[in-house]
């Protein structure tokens, strides 16, 4: 009995100690600073350059660190493998999260805000509408838009970002609705522009505020979309674009979608498609302007294709756009260098054990893609604009401008296609000079060159054709 009691006295504390150690090890939060009470490190993030905010903490604490911004405790992640775990392997534990005001403006039933069965049902429908086989047919319509836009730029100074927004908006409309009447399109465009003005405003729903005006425009958009759905249903034709696909699906018993689910996803698509593509295109023009040798090489590639088109007396086709390897690498490198979506916002849906750390339920989790895209371990001389680096594929998980996993971008092929078509005509026929000497970046909401890159466009001196 005595040896038994003795061993209990000796062993029990050791067992308890070990359990306690295991517990505290399991509950180890990532290293980092939570800053001041309530405001956390928000002021530091906004007063420092965001890139140096992230990189200085990465240097001090490693690839996974905690901080506190915009009233939320956050874990930031800058290792490609850990980012993949959040987006792919353990995606069910990290839900996408957006401010409530954004959800109200876009529409709470848009797919970005959801996980699980509803999300995957919608995602399949949206993805099917943007597969290469589905967008092949839009080449001539997109090219038609380019041919209408470009001559209006000649011998004028344009705001690149604003013009690219016009172009990307029109392409988004084609993909949302297919063919539509000019008047109908103008009506939707006007309402969407009113809505857009509220996106980055204070979410104050009082008469006269930009947010209130935006919400009013959102309601009117709903009415317009409902009328369109009614007309298409009555005519017995679902019509083109994503609207046609979603109307078709809502007729099937299994897929039943309500009108507001359809409307939210149409507005969501326009939101996702247009500022993103316009910002990237603005950077493409900036990089080509600053790198004359790259512009000359792109022009040579595009002139080769132009010559064939002239000889065969035909317009651009999908297959032509697959034969633009150098121009495609320029787009790839722009997506890396500009990294317009610097990070992705997720939230832990439960307490999570993650790479040896504890992430409490409700904490925000942010994979930092700009930091990964600018890490010298994966991209030599990361600040240099060098499309040739994509002659060899990047290391797995280090390059994700469209992300990976359940919420990856379904519009990546369309975005690349509209950029290639524009670059074909622009490089062959025009040249552009940046106006003013203001270098730098502005956020609106994505990082873009200062003042939206004002440029003066001229006809190319020696057009080959
Ligand atoms: C260069 C332009 C674009 C970039 C850089 C881009 C990037 C992205 C990224 C990074 C995401 C994932 C966001 C997250 O994980 O939280 C995303 C999602 C999405 N994108 Fe894009 N995108 C672009 C253009 C487009 C276009 C043209 C469309 C539509 C035609 C589109 C439709 C969507 C949709 C619907 C989602 C939500 C997917 C989901 O939640 O399952 N995007 N995009």
Image: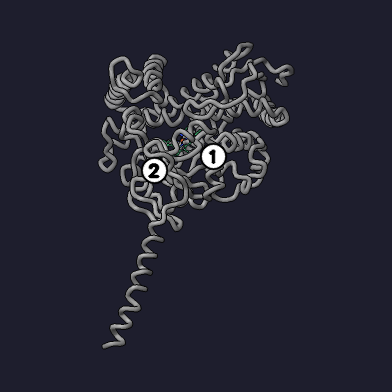
Residue 262 is drawn in which quadrant?
A: top left
Task: Indicate the position of residue 339 as horizontal and vertical percent values.
Answer: 54, 36
Task: Indicate the position of residue 277 as horizontal and vertical percent values.
Answer: 51, 29
Where, quadrant-wise, is the N terminus in this rendering?
Answer: bottom left
Q: Is residue 363 visible?
A: yes
Q: Of 304 and 414, which appears nearest the observer?
A: 414
- Taking 366 as reference, is 424 left or right? right
Dot placed on the residue nearer the N-terminal end, 2 or 1: 2
Task: Indicate the position of residue 26 as horizontal and vertical percent values.
Answer: 39, 60
Badge 2 vs badge 1, beta-carbon distance below 8 Å: no
Q: Is residue 124 visible?
A: no
Q: Which numbered tag is attached to residue 370?
A: 1
Within 8 Å: ligand 1 and the Cβ of disc 1?
no
Residue on which the image places disc 2: 73
Query: Going 68% across and 40% down the picture, which residue do you hit?
Result: 388
Query: Going 28% across and 87% down the picture, which residue do you hit?
Result: 2
- Give the secondary structure at mark 2: strand
């Amino acid at each position: 009995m005595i040896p038994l009691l003795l061993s209990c006295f000796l062993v029990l504390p050791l067992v308890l100690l070990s359990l306690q150690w295991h517990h505290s090890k399991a509950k180890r939060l990532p290293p980092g600073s939570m800053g001041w009470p309530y405001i956390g490190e928000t002021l530091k993030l906004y007063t420092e350059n965001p890139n140096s905010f992230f990189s200085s903490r990465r240097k001090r604490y490693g690839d996974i660190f905690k901080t506190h911004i915009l009233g939320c405790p956050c874990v930031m992640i800058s290792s490609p493998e850990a980012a993949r775990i959040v987006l792919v392997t353990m995606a069910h534990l990290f839900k996408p999260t957006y401010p409530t005001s954004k959800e109200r403006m876009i529409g709470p039933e848009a797919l970005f805000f959801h996980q699980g069965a509803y999300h995957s049902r919608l995602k399949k429908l949206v993805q099917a509408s943007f597969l290469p086989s589905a967008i092949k047919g839009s080449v001539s319509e997109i090219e038609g838009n380019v041919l209408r836009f470009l001559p209006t730029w000649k011998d004028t100074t344009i705001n690149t970002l604003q013009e690219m927004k016009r172009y990307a908006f029109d392409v988004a409309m084609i993909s949302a609705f297919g063919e539509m009447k000019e008047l109908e399109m103008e009506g939707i465009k006007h309402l969407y522009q009113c809505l857009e003005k509220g996106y980055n405003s204070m979410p104050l729903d009082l008469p006269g505020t930009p947010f209130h005006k935006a919400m009013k425009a959102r309601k009117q958009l709903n009415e317009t979309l409902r009328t369109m759905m009614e007309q298409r249903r009555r005519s017995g034709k679902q019509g083109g674009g994503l609207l046609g696909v979603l109307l078709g699906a809502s007729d099937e018993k299994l897929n039943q979608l309500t009108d507001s689910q359809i409307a939210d996803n149409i507005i969501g698509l326009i939101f996702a498609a247009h500022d993103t593509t316009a910002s990237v295109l603005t950077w493409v023009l900036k990089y080509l302007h600053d790198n004359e040798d790259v512009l000359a090489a792109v022009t040579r590639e595009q002139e080769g294709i132009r010559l064939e088109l002239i000889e065969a007396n035909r317009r651009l086709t999908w297959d032509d756009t697959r034969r633009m390897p150098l121009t495609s690498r320029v787009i790839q490198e722009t997506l890396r260098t500009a990294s317009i979506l610097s990070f992705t916002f997720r939230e832990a849906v439960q307490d999570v054990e993650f790479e040896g750390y504890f992430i409490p339920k409700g904490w925000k989790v942010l994979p930092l893609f700009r930091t990964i895209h600018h890490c010298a371990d994966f991209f030599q001389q990361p600040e240099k604009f060098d499309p040739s680096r994509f002659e060899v594929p990047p290391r797995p998980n280090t390059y994700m401008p469209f992300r990976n996993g359940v919420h990856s971008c379904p519009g990546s092929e369309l975005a690349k296609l509209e950029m290639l078509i524009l670059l074909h005509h622009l490089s062959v026929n025009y040249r552009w000079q940046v106006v003013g000497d203001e270098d730098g970046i502005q956020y609106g909401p994505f990082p873009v060159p200062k003042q939206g890159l004002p440029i003066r466009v001229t006809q190319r001196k020696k057009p080959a054709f």
